[in-house]
């Protein structure tokens, strides 16, 4: 059995109107002109470091992640695959609300999100009313990774919550066994890349990663 090493590259979607409006979760919105240009520039970078003839590209279900993946696919000359459920975290009462709306309706939840983004709390302490249980979300992430093809590199275009989830899984930050499943600040079109041989253990690829990872 050959010990071939593959890459799993997590990509946060390009800038969208949702980012401008500072909306939590939701179904997503169209990319801005800047977001389209970010994606084109990213595709040029990826074309130089990945074998596009043997590349798996999948995207989460949000509108802006699909739009980002569509541009990447066109620029790289590949198609977007059809994964199993690849859905962002349901944020309960906060889902689809802007920061301003959340502050007006649920100020205590907005303060909790601010603590989350400041890395003062981990996922267990992010207790938002009606939010999807974090262990259910964790299992969805495990299923996504388990169903990646084992014979090629993979690009996963993610919402923010999914990218943080998958990065924490591959870094080994289990929400029950550690308190290290925390927020990661990721710019639009930011990359977190991992190397793997067996798709069970992963090593951070620091050359491709453009995000500051506390590991």
Image (cartoon, rainbow, N blue to C red):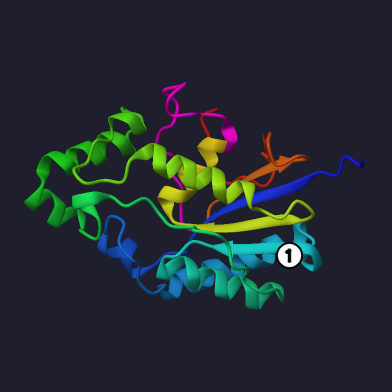
In this rendering, is residue 7 above or below 117? Answer: below
Give residue 144's position: percent from left, percent from top: 56, 51
Q: Which quadrant: the C terminus?
A: top right
At 25% from the left and 39% from the top, the residue drawn is 114
Give residue 68's position: percent from left, percent from top: 52, 69
At 56% from the left and 75% from the top, the residue drawn is 70
Q: Residue furthest left?
A: 104
Give residue 119's position: percent from left, percent from top: 35, 31
Residue 172 belongs to the span the image colors magenta: yes
Q: Residue furthest right?
A: 1
**SS for callout 1:** helix
Disc 1 crowd rating (10 Å Cα; few below 14, some 14-19, many 20+) is: some
Whether residue 180 sits left or right of residue 17 in the image: it is: right
At 43% from the left and 68% from the top, the residue drawn is 64
Can the viewer see residue 119?
A: no
Whether residue 126 sits left or right of residue 107 in the image: it is: right
Whether residue 76 sits left or right of residue 83 in the image: it is: right
Numbered disc total: 1
Can the viewer see residue 32?
A: yes
Instruction: Choose between 74 and 92: the one closer to the eye.
Output: 92
At 43% from the left and 57% from the top, the residue drawn is 87
Q: Main secondary structure of the magenta part?
A: loop
Q: Which residue is mark 1?
A: 47
Q: Which quadrant: the N terminus?
A: top right
Give residue 61's position: percent from left, percent from top: 45, 65
Residue 70 belongs to the span the image colors magenta: no
Whether residue 122 sits left or right of residue 50 in the image: it is: left
Residue stretch rendered in magenta on the structure: 170-188
């Amino acid at each position: 059995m050959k010990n071939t090493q593959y890459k799993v590259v997590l990509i946060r979607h390009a800038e969208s109107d949702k980012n401008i409006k500072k909306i939590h979760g939701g179904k997503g919105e169209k990319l801005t002109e800047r977001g389209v240009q970010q994606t084109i520039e990213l595709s040029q970078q990826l074309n130089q470091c990945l074998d596009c003839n043997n590349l798996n590209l999948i995207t989460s279900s949000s509108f802006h992640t699909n739009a980002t993946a569509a541009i990447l696919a066109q620029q790289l000359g590949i198609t977007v695959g059809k994964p199993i459920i690849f859905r962002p975290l349901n944020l309960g009462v906060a889902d689809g609300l802007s920061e301003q709306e959340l502050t007006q309706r649920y100020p205590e939840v907005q303060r909790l999100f601010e603590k989350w983004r400041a890395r003062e709390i981990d996922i267990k302490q992010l207790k938002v009313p009606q939010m999807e249980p974090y262990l259910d979300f964790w299992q969805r992430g495990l299923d996504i990774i388990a169903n990646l093809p084992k014979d090629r590199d993979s690009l996963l275009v993610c919402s923010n919550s999914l990218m943080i989830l998958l990065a924490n899984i591959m870094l080994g930050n289990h929400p029950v066994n550690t308190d290290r499943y925390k927020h990661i600040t990721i710019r639009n079109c930011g990359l977190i890349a991992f190397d793997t041989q067996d798709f069970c253990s992963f090593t951070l690829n620091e050359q491709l990663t453009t995000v500051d990872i506390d590991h």
